[in-house]
Amino acid sequence: MEPVVTAQPEMSSATYAAAGVSISAGDEAVERLKPWAAKATRPEVMGGLGGFAGLFKLRLDRWREPVIASSTDGVGTKIAIAQALDIHDTVGIDLVAMVVDDLVVCGAEPMFLQDYIAVGKVVPERIAELVKGISTGCVQAGCALLGGETAEHPGMMAATDYDLSATGVGVVEEDALLGPDRVRPGDAVIALGSSGLHSNGYSLARHVLLDIARVPLSGHVEEFGRSLGEELLEPTRIYAKDCLALIAETEVRTFAHVTGGGLAGNLSRVMPEGLTAVVDRGTWTPSPVFSMIQQRGRVGRDEMEQTFNMGVGMVAVVAAEEADRALAVLTARHVPAWVAGEVRRTPDVVGDDENRPAVLLTGEHPRF
């Protein structure tokens, strides 16, 4: 008996779109973001978006012994707040801040930045909003947005999920490099105020404020004068141009960008062996968001100071005689700043001989 052959129904062809990746949506996203990318440029940029590589002409006539500096970073879980509120045009500013303010610590002028956006599904309008924020941050920092990459990851990320990262490149003269080797006893430690949490500690902040205290993101908070969501989405202050102005007008020894690890953890990275930065907490009051987290979560002081910036986003170490001039420069640029301490020889710092830290925090914050 002959076998019976049953005709199989014709199956439709598999496509990239059926697998979750839309080339047309990606093309539309590129078209939508072009106007924002065009706003963040510099004269050295060559060509436009769409090439395989971004081109930036380094004007060697401007530099004698140029040193290239680079930095890569992301935004972290602050993105979860943006996604919950469906507000996507500010986290790009945070991204730029995290990158360029690491660059300027060594004295480098940020020249350009390239971003990477990973999404579960390309929504052109959302991509344009993200790039709007990145462009805004680049304008604030004085650097160019030299392109980047948007990657669609269906099956690995939910359709509404996304993550951001970026790499920035800067240039500094070799003999103008800032760092621990320039720091001297008696130098003034100048604190530059933060705009809030910036982009660090959001896992703890979200756990305390949303999970423990159950404060709704849309709820008005009297201490903030606005909703919790607005407070948590406040963009990170970008200090790059302010730091470059300080370098141009005063004798700066070094900077410390206060991010993960807090004030002491980051300032210690630019303190040379044998010297200690003594910082007085009594010289400033952290903004209310920090005290709310501390009180609602019963978070210990050490944990707070290791996790959050506590109101200081950048530190400048300057020659003592330059402190007043540095404050005048920052005040003219509308940056809150104050002398928070000084650099001392480590043996002159009170404490156990074997446990004297590179940074010593003294005193108590007023009304905290």
Image (cartoon, helix red, strand yellow):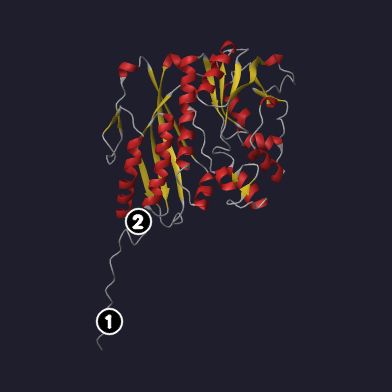
Q: Earlier in the sequence, mark 2 or mark 1?
A: 1
Which quadrant would the N terminus be assigned to in this image? bottom left
Q: Position of residue 88 (x, y in %)?
A: 46, 47
Q: Position of residue 149 (x, y in %)?
A: 36, 43
The answer to whether any part of residue 276 appears in the image is: no
Q: Is residue 111 left or right of residue 284?
A: left
Callout 2: helix, strand or loop? loop
Residue carrying label 2: 21
Q: Is residue 174 left or right of residue 54?
A: right
- Nearest the camera: 249 or 168? 249
Q: Amino acid at mark 2?
A: Val
Q: Are marks 2 and 1 in contact (CB under 8 Å)?
A: no
Callout 1: helix, strand or loop? loop
Name, please, the residue furthest toward the bottom.
1
Question: Who's the residue at 28% across and 66% down the image?
Answer: 13
Local packing at callout 1 (Cα closer than 10 Å; few below 14, some 14-19, many 20+) is: few
Question: Who's the residue at 42% across and 16% down the image?
Answer: 174
| Residue 210: mark in rendering | none
Local packing at callout 2 (Cα closer than 10 Å; few below 14, some 14-19, many 20+) is: some
Q: Position of residue 23 (x, y in %)?
A: 30, 53
Question: Who's the residue at 65% across and 20% down the image?
Answer: 341
Residue carrying label 1: 6
Which quadrant would the C terminus be assigned to in this image? top right
Question: Who's the residue at 71% across and 17% down the image?
Answer: 349
